[in-house]
Image (cartoon, coloured by chain):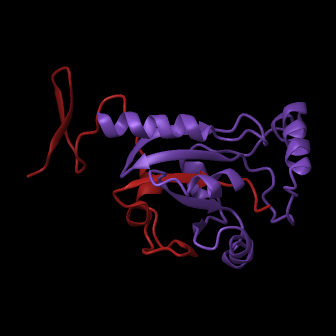
Chain colours: A red, B purple
């Protein structure tokens, strides 16, 4: 059963992802589905599993210094 | 970086995940000295930065007065600029996530713009109560 989401006006669209909370920003799918990640102390190779279910603080560093 | 390392000693602080544009080997040397337990993703081509909307900085963002002032303050605190890794024009940022949701975000306005970790913790507390 595909979840039905984005029921704007009389348009109903079937998509493969669950409905997102309106107004809540989410991680872009390009990042969420990223795989073959390399790094240190990573328990997985894909981004969604590395982030996991607990709150995570993603820190994007400008440079290492 | 120092603030985050210190803040992780708080029991409620979310686990940090660093993303950088250097190589795995360069990051290993960097984190081994500063935060041995840190998790980090090497995003050499910048695809994760791009997906989070973090672009390369303008001249003003990188070398403007606010960036230079913050650089001077950091220098006086003993935080020296490391060896160039080839992506010094990349703008930084921070995002508090819970699964795929973004609960809080900080997009640096200039190269020395640091995230407000107290504000981040308040967002986490508010999300936990919701």
Drawn side of residue A63 relative to residue B80, left or right:
left
Can residue B40 be seen in this snapshot? yes
In the image, A27 versus B119, the foreground residue is B119
| Image height of A44 relative to A16, above or below | below
Identify the residue at horizontal 52%, vertical 71% (top origin).
A37
Number of marks present in the image shown: 0
Q: Position of residue B25 (x, y in %)?
A: 70, 79
Identify the residue at horizontal 87%, vertical 58% (top origin).
B81
Identify the residue at horizontal 84%, vertical 55% (top origin).
B79
In the picture as drawn, the residue positioned furthest to the front comes out as: B10
In the picture as drawn, the residue positioned furthest to the bottom comes out as: B25
| Image height of B22 relative to A13, above or below | below
Drawn side of residue B112 relative to residue B75, left or right:
left
Q: Position of residue B69 (x, y in %)?
A: 89, 36
Identify the residue at horizontal 81%, vertical 66% (top origin).
B85
| Image height of B65 relative to B25, above or below | above
Q: Position of residue B39 (x, y in %)?
A: 55, 68
In the picture as drawn, the residue positioned furthest to the top comes out as: A9
Can residue B1 be seen in this snapshot? no
In the image, A15 versus B30, the foreground residue is B30
Quadrant of the frame with the C terminus of chain A: bottom right
In the picture as drawn, the residue positioned furthest to the left comes out as: A1
Q: Position of residue B5 (x, y in %)?
A: 64, 58
- Quadrant of res A22: top left
Drawn side of residue B32 relative to residue B111, left or right:
left
């Amino acid at each position: 059963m595909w979840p039905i989401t984005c029921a704007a006006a009389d348009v109903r669209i079937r998509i493969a992802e669950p409905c997102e909370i309106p107004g809540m920003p989410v991680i872009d799918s390009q990042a969420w589905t990223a795989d073959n990640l390399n790094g240190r102390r990573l328990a997985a190779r894909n981004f969604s599993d590395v982030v996991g279910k607990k709150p995570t603080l993603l820190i994007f560093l400008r440079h290492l210094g | 970086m120092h603030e985050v390392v210190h803040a992780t000693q708080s029991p409620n602080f979310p686990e940090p995940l660093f993303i950088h544009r250097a190589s795995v080997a360069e990051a290993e040397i960097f984190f081994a000295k500063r935060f041995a337990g840190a998790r980090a993703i090497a995003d050499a081509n910048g695809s994760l930065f791009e997906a989070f909307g973090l672009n390369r900085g303008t001249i003003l963002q990188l070398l403007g007065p606010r960036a230079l002032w913050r650089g001077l303050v950091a220098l006086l605190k003993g935080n020296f600029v490391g060896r160039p890794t080839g992506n010094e024009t990349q703008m930084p940022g921070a995002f508090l996530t819970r699964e795929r949701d973004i609960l809080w975000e900080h997009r640096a306005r200039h190269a020395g713009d640091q995230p407000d970790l107290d504000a981040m913790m308040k967002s986490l507390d508010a999300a936990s109560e919701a």
